Image: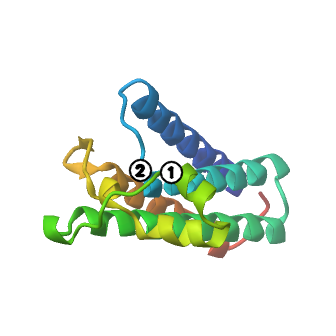
Amino acid sequence: MITSRQIFLLIFLVCAVLLGFGFYLQYVEGLDPCILCMIQRVFFILVGVTALMGFLHNPAAAGIRIYASFTALFAACGAGIAGRQIWLQHLPPEKVPECGGDLFFLLEVYPLGEAILNALKGTGDCAEVVWTFLGFSIPEWAFVLFLGIFLISLYILFRPRKAE
């Protein structure tokens, strides 16, 4: 039977590979991420770091539940952001919001709270599909992966505890 520690390591490795692929697309293929893509990266980092901490710490049952809860929470937030971008990508062209500045511009111009709210709205940049694999765009793949991590985290959270 696979242990929670092994699952946390697997989640961390998946996030590390995804982030590495995202940086490959950005720096080798020249695909600049939009604001919502950057926020999804942050949630993959949060999921990955939390899973790595769960792996390294190797806690008892209560600690496993805490790490699994945070992993599930961050994955749910990431899925929500990816879902927002999927929605923007499927809007009719006349309803797509105008393109705006990137995340760093928003953080320079607005206070933190307002910059985050503006970023979460997304822009025309976020509605553009620049890469697909098997017919799915980057945010659609991110949504599927966040959902998978969320479900695995729930499994860790609610499965019966035996000696791990």
Residue type, mark 1 in image: Met
Q: Quadrant of the C terminus?
A: bottom right
Q: Which residue is mark 1?
A: 38
Q: Residue at image x 68%, y 71%? A: 69
User: Residue 151: x and y, percent?
Assistant: 50, 67
Q: Quadrant of the N terminus?
A: bottom right
Which element type, helix, strand or loop, lies under badge 1? Answer: helix
Quarter of the figure with residue 108: bottom right
* Number of numbered discs overlaid on the protein picture: 2
Residue that extends furthest to the top in the rendered view of this protein: 28
Whether residue 3 is visible here, answered yes or no, is no
Give the distance between the C-alpha atoms of the residues marked 2 and 1, in whole angstroms.
Answer: 6 Å
Which element type, helix, strand or loop, lies under badge 2? Answer: loop
User: Closest to the observer: 2 or 137?
Assistant: 137
Quarter of the figure with residue 85: bottom left
Residue type, mark 2 in image: Cys
Above or below residue 87? Residue 100 is above
User: Closest to the observer: 68 or 133?
Assistant: 133
Whether residue 75 is visible here, answered yes or no, is yes
Q: What kind of colouring is applied to the model shown?
A: rainbow
Above or below residue 23? Residue 157 is below
Q: Which residue is mark 2?
A: 34
User: Residue 162: x and y, percent?
Assistant: 75, 66
Labels 2 & 1 near each other (Cβ < 8 A): yes
Q: Residue at image x 59%, y 59%? A: 109
Left or right: residue 45 versus residue 88 is right
Q: Residue at image x 49%, y 69%? A: 118
| Crowd around label 1: few <14 · some 14–19 · many ≥20 (10 Å) | some
Left or right: residue 56 versus residue 148 is right
User: Residue 155: x and y, percent?
Assistant: 58, 69
